[in-house]
Amino acid sequence: MAVLTSERRAGWRRALVLLLLLSWASGLAAEWQEYAARYAVYRNGKLVGKAEFSLQKQGDLWVSKSEGSGTHGLARILRARDNEYVEGHLRDGRFYPLKYTQHTRVAGVDNEWNAQFDWDRNAVKIVDGKNRLTLDLGTGALDALSLKLELQRRLRESEPELNFYLVDEDEIKEQQFRKLNKEMLETSLGCLQTIPVERVRSNSKRYTRAWHAPEFEFITVRLEHGKTGGDHMEMRITELVLGDRLVSPQPGCVAQQLSP
């Protein structure tokens, strides 16, 4: 078996974390409803893992979770896993997180950190091992899962403002996206009309694109992330439950074109 260098292990961890952080797979509706979505994860066209996302109401709280794991190839050998959790309240149609946690494990090496939001003081306390840091939330910085909810809420607008601030392990970073033209996309759920969104980057070979389905509460049905000339990561939806309804596959794009 090839020796796994620290650099290569770190590369796999970054790829897995980026894929899950940017998946945008929450089920926020005009009136929220619970959901569960499953995805197949590919690296350079080969199946390497799976991801599951959910949104549930628990008492007065709304809870969103993501779980990703390597199931094939080197990702399986490295036992790559990434779990995220956030709980918060709904206020004026928007989700406000209270507690966020991310736990990543690759080749037996763990990395875990959490963020606690204090909206009265407009501050967030980040705990990463023994390191503790308190940052100003500014105009409303969000963790990765909460940012997904807010992005999908804004996509309901005809001309959405897609500039965000993300709470990371030791800083708050600005992230900007742009909405592209609508596109019909072939998926496991059938041929869907989607709204593609891409991350705006300056002087970078990296790209991130996601396709949201308005028909299904703007849930992401496909995600692509990678680097020009480098690895290409992709996530494709395989199953979706909205509320208590399992979404049945619709006809494919070719079948729709041939129908009278």
Image (spheres, grey):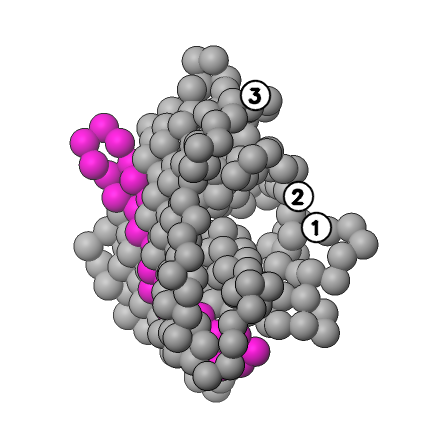
Residues at circles 1 and 2 in contact by the CB criterion of under 8 Å: yes
Residue at point 76%, 57% (across, down):
204
Query: Looking at the picture, which amino acid does disc 3 mark?
Result: Asp
**Residues rendered magenta in the picture:** 38-64
Q: From what the image shows, is residue 60 above or below residue 188?
A: above
Q: Position of residue 169 (x, y in %)?
A: 52, 39
Identify the mark at residue 200; answer none if there is no mark.
Answer: 1
Number of numbered tags placed on the structure image: 3
Residue at point 26%, 31% (across, down):
61
Q: Nearer the viewer, mark 1 or mark 3?
A: 3
Determine the CA span between mark 1 and mark 3: 24 Å
Q: Position of residue 150 (x, y in %)?
A: 48, 38
Which residue position holds label 3? Answer: 136
Determine the CA span between mark 3 and mark 2: 19 Å
Please tell me how crowded label 1 is: few (under 14), some (14-19), or many (20+) other residues with Cα within 10 Å.
some
Residue 60 lies within the magenta run: yes
Q: Nearer the viewer, residue 97 or 18?
A: 18
Determine the CA span between mark 1 and mark 2: 5 Å
Residue 65 lies within the magenta run: no
Disc 2 is placed on an element classified as: strand
Question: Is 96 on the left or on the right of 21, as rendered?
Answer: left
Question: Is 197 on the left or on the right of 201, as rendered?
Answer: left
- Where the C terminus falls, by quadrant? bottom left
Query: Looking at the picture, which amino acid does disc 2 mark?
Result: Gln
Please tell me how crowded label 2 is: few (under 14), some (14-19), or many (20+) other residues with Cα within 10 Å.
few
Q: Nearer the viewer, residue 168 or 59?
A: 168
Residues at circles 3 and 2 in contact by the CB criterion of under 8 Å: no
Q: From what the image shows, is residue 141 above or below residue 148?
A: above
Q: Position of residue 80 (x, y in %)?
A: 40, 65
The answer to which image quadrant residue 246 occupies is: bottom left
Question: Is 241 on the left or on the right of 113, as rendered?
Answer: left
Disc 3 is placed on an element classified as: strand
